[in-house]
Amino acid sequence: MSRIVVDARGSFCPGPLMELVKTIKDAEVGTEIEVLSSDESSAKDIPEWVKKAGHELVGVEKKGDYWSIVVKKLK
Amino acid sequence: MKNIVIIGGGVGGTLVSNYLSHKLKEEIREGKTKITLISDRDKQLYEPGLLYMIFNRMEEGELFKELTYLLDPMIDLKIERATKIVADENYVETEKGRYDYDYLVIATGSRIVPEEVPGLVEGGHWFYNVEGARRLRDELARFKGGKIVVSIMGIPHKCPVAPIEVTFMLHDFFKLHRLRDKVEILYTYPINRVFTLENVTEVVVEYFNERGIKYKTFFNPIEVDAKNKKIITLEGEEEPYDLLIAIPPHKGSQLIIDSGLGDRDGWVPTDRYTLKVEGYDNIYAVGDATNLPVSKAGSVAHFEAEVISENIAAQIKGLPPTARYFGKAMCFIEMGFDLGTYIWFDYETPPKLVKPNKFIHWSKIAYNRLYWLTARGVL
């Protein structure tokens, strides 16, 4: 399974979510996208969007001073 | 002889050029420094005026001024299209020649790319360039009822508050024409609120609700079905419309992409404080061209131009370049035809919104006429 890492650290809302949106548009179904964000609100906003858009939230993890949010494209 | 080259004749480019020529008068007179501005057009467009043009509140002729009128005569203006920046060898290629530089300022702005959303060119309208504004002005004059969708199809885009402003102005426009009860207005935004800044969102939602303006969030269009007049989103929704006013996706200049200086969308990686292009000590970026997490707006270019010109002038004079940009931005927000507010913020200070009032609206109307003094480096 392929995984794309989107490093959006240093950018604030809506940067990380919009980076995910751009990446997911072009990705193949089944791809996992890992968004790295230093903005705390991403840990809440991205899962909310993933739910609405019908993709799978694989995990949200705090790694030191940033968050890793992994999303799987389902459709 | 030190050569300073600026590429781009928008607000950022003219301001940096004018500020530099004021600061380096002596050096230019003595032939020690030369400022060259390269622009692919001979007139500057006052882009915020397009919002007024679509409602016939500013005329097209008011929105343009010759660059020769705006620039200090000591600046060497070249109306040429730059085709490549060769950053590692300190020169710029244009269709007509080559310009070597000691300092380069990239002021190439941003552009809309409506063609990147399938069906948008055929099925939508916009006011982010003159051609689009003309078409939308005529369409609004003809519109006698139905559903208007104002849809933001990508972030970042120029003037982040313009979609909110156009939505409020649509309300007042159709109210004046006694058609408001026949017009449904829907505003859509890609994230989970109607604007990026939370306290602006609160006020906008309150005023949207008072005016019966509907809104949808987490709305990311991927296609416009022009034939059936529907917007299709990444979230799996379909939204019908009678008139679509889109904020098309934006990209950086093709010159930046061709020169290998930009990220995926053509934005120039720029240090948020020094405004130097990452990896280069003698190249600066100003305004929309940068990848900075600040508004793509004229006021940002204005405040950045002050910092860049101060630092380049200092280096030419043999002084340390100590000016820093702290993310300062100031935006008027029109909330109708006689109501306005403004926000001011920087990297560390969140914006505070003053209660919308008529005075701020009329200040903005006055500024629309005074703007050319800003471009000349006077105001």
Image (cartoon, coloured by chain):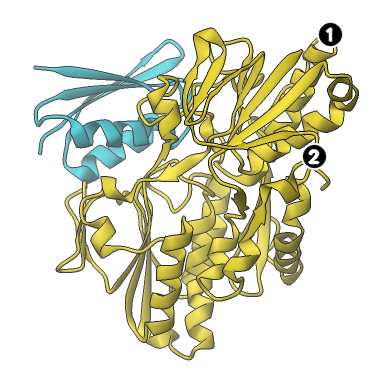
Q: Residue at x 40, y 19 (%)?
A: B260
Quick one: SS at disc 2? loop
Task: Kindly identify which numbered label has been placed on residue B93.
Answer: none
Tag 1, which secondary structure?
loop
Q: Please report, as a chain letter, where disc 1 is located.
A: B
Q: Give the quadrant of residue A41.
A: top left
Residue B283 rendering spot, x and y as whole percentages: 60, 17
On what subunit does the disc labeled 2 rest?
B
Above or below for B49 versus B251: below
**Which dot, 2 or 1, sits closer to the camera?**
2
Q: How many marks?
A: 2
Which residue is nearer to you in this view: B115 or A57?
B115
- Name chain A's colour: cyan
Colour yellow maps to chain: B
Residue B111 to residue B214: above or below: above
Spatial CA distance of label 2 from label 1 is 25 Å
Left or right of residue B96: residue B122:
left
Q: What amino acid type is highlighted by mark number 2? A: Pro
Identify residue for label 1: B318
Residue underneath mark 2? B73
Q: In this view, does A32 lie above or below B124?
A: above
Q: Position of residue B322 (x, y in %)?
A: 78, 15
- The residue lying at 48 percent from left, 40 percent from top is B110
Q: How crowded is mark 2: few (under 14 residues within 10 Å), some or many (20 or more)?
A: few
Upstream in sequence: badge 2 or badge 1: 2
Q: Where is residue B252 in the image (x, y as percent from the top left)?
A: 44, 35
